[in-house]
Amino acid sequence: MGPDPCPGRSGEATGKASRAPDRRLSRGRRAGLLDPVAAFPSQKASPMPSSELSFRPLQAPVPALTVGVVAVAPFLALLLLALTSDIGLADRARYLMGAWGAILLAFHGGCRWGFAAAGLGEGATWWTLGVGVVPALLGLLALGVGGRAMLWIEAPAFVAVFAADVALARVGGTPGWWPGLILPLLTICTVCTMIGALT
């Protein structure tokens, strides 16, 4: 057999073949960043030991803690307004407090959906997604009832949400810092709604 008349072509073909897997891998990585299903595969996470859970607020990411504090600030402002204003304005402040509480309950349920969609815990199952809707339904019920009863519905709802999230965190269904983030925030929500309902 004679020498290859075009030795450069053979080397070039080998180089292209060796670079092809790298290009496919690069495309796969880009797809993982753009495709949420590829980036967060739906698989069960192993249960998270209680020692990995944190109930310290400062263990949460700074953006989450900052946004959380801003979210509960209206409760404190509206409660102060309800305690220091005349009857008409105080009733309006209580209604706004209850309306904001309903929004926060719905938002909290949305967080549970986000955890499930990201594949944490059991993933997006009927149970995890169904439980995620319950806080929004409780908020809707409170809005429908109105008055001080609205606040009486929301106060235990915040406590129940916290207990449910701690149980979810223990099986790996939330980030480890989640209980520490929501503990002070939901405590403020619960105390404010109870004081608003009693005064």
Image (tube, rainbow, N blue to C red):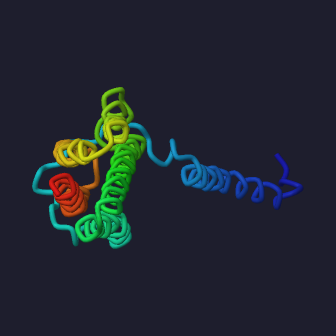
Please determine whether, in this image, residue 17 is positioned above or below residue 135: below
Pick the front one: 70 or 89: 89
Left or right, 17 with reference to 70: right
Q: Can residue 143 be spotted in the picture?
A: yes
Q: Please state the horizontal and vertical placement of residue 53, each as a whole percent of the image.
A: 16, 56
Q: Quadrant of the N terminus?
A: top right
- Residue 50 picture location, percent across and down: 11, 51
Q: Residue at x 38, y 67 (%)?
A: 67
Question: In the image, is residue 164 above or below residue 58?
Answer: above
Can I make out residue 171 in this image? no
- Nearest the eye: 133 or 196: 196
Q: Which residue appears farthest toward the right when viewing the image?
A: 5
Residue 189, image quadrant: bottom left
Left or right of 39 in this view: 74: left
Residue at image coords 21%, 62%? 188
Q: Quadrant of residue 56?
A: bottom left
* Picture coordinates of residue 161, whole percent (x, y): 23, 45
Q: Residue furthest left?
A: 51
Q: Quadrant of the C terminus?
A: bottom left
Q: Residue at x 34, y 38 (%)?
A: 132
The correct choice, above or below, for 121 with respect to 73 in the image is above
- Toward the viewer: 80 or 91? 91
How far across and down, in percent of the image, does residue 65 sit?
A: 31, 69
